Image: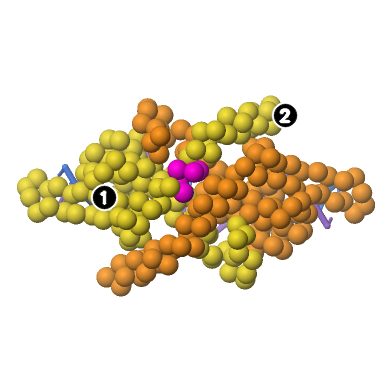
Chain colours: A orange, B yellow, C purple, D blue
DNA sequence: CCGAATCCAGACCGATACTG
DNA sequence: CAGTATCGGTCTGGATTCGG
């Protein structure tokens, strides 16, 4: 199978939509963090370094809408909300892992190349 | 190996930098197109639907800086320039393929989920 | 504790016009 | 053919403030 589908809607093919989804700054980090099991909002906030409350909320909502994460609110005082990967969400871990492995093996080369072209 | 590295630089880990790279609208489409072999600027322009000249140039320059693509200019009239994946660039095809496969298998579910939550 | 809502600076990117 | 330069709208996302 070719990597890209050459049709008039290539800019709207599944690959393109997936990349729209995971291409933002936080989605993959959140999925990777939730790999360890259900987690509360405040836990995620602490474990995902640098994320703002707004983006955490926003990204979780998107993941929920996409069916990758389930949100469970417990009607307690104080409120407790847990987020957990769905089966669909977990099925995305393997392909992401392939990318992460590539990154850990090759990003040094990429960085070297960047540095060299920066010098020029 | 965990998907995400939990250190103070999690927002700057290799995975993060890779995603910064391939997360934009065109990078993956270009790499996928160049899978078929060396290609000229105008060919790329035609095959990657919807890309503007500006973004094509810009994305190719980034890919070149990262060592994923080589640019070869032939001093002819009219000018001819060819772009080709490096070994490093080609090594990225497999992990990307894993993502594309996931997308083709599961994006319908994601879309359904989106539609349902949109209705609500 | 878990968010929602607002404001706003800056990045992104398409369109257009021009060049060797 | 293969770009470069510039303009301007859109979108992102951080900071802040407020609510249940």
Residue at left offset 92%, top offset 49%: A76
The x and y percentages for residue A33 are 67, 56
Up the image or down, B45 lies above or below A32; here it is: above
Q: Secondary structure at mark 2?
A: loop
Foreground mark, 2 or 1?
1
Up the image or down, D14 lies above or below A119; here it is: above
* Quarter of the image that includes the C terminus of chain B: top right
Residue behind mark 2: B120
On the rendered structure, is B43 left or right of A62? left
On the rendered structure, is B92 left or right of B72? right
- Is residue A55 visible to the viewer in this orientation of the structure? no
Residue at left offset 43%, top offset 62%: A106
Up the image or down, D12 lies above or below A43; here it is: above
The x and y percentages for residue A92 are 59, 44
Q: Residues within 10 Å of mark 1 (few under 14, many from 20)?
A: many
Q: Secondary structure at mark 1?
A: strand
Residue extending farthest to the right is: A77
Residue at left offset 63%, top offset 54%: A32
Q: Which of the chains bears the disc numbered 2?
A: B
The x and y percentages for residue B5 are 60, 64
- Is residue B10 visible to the viewer in this orientation of the structure? yes
* Quarter of the image that includes the N terminus of chain B: bottom right
Residues marked 2 and 1 touching at CB (< 8 Å): no
Residue stretch rendered in magenta on the structure: B95-99
Q: Quadrant of residue A1?
A: top left
Q: CA distance from mark 2 to mark 1?
A: 47 Å
B96 or C7: nearer the viewer: B96
Residue behind mark 1: B84
The answer to whether residue B96 is magenta is: yes
Q: Earlier in the sequence, mark 2 or mark 1?
A: 1
């Amino acid at each position: 199978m070719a990597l890209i589908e050459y049709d008039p809607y290539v800019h709207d093919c599944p690959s393109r939509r997936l990349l729209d989804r995971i291409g933002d700054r936080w989605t993959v980090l959140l999925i990777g963090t939730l790999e360890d099991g259900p987690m509360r909002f405040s836990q995620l906030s602490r474990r995902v370094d640098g994320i703002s409350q707004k983006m955490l909320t926003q990204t979780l909502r998107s993941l929920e809408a996409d069916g990758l994460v389930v949100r469970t609110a417990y009607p307690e005082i104080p409120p407790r909300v847990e987020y957990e990967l769905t089966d669909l969400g977990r099925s995305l871990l393997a392909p992401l892992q392939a990318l992460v492995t590539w990154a850990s093996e090759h990003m040094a080369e990429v960085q070297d190349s960047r540095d060299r072209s920066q010098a020029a």
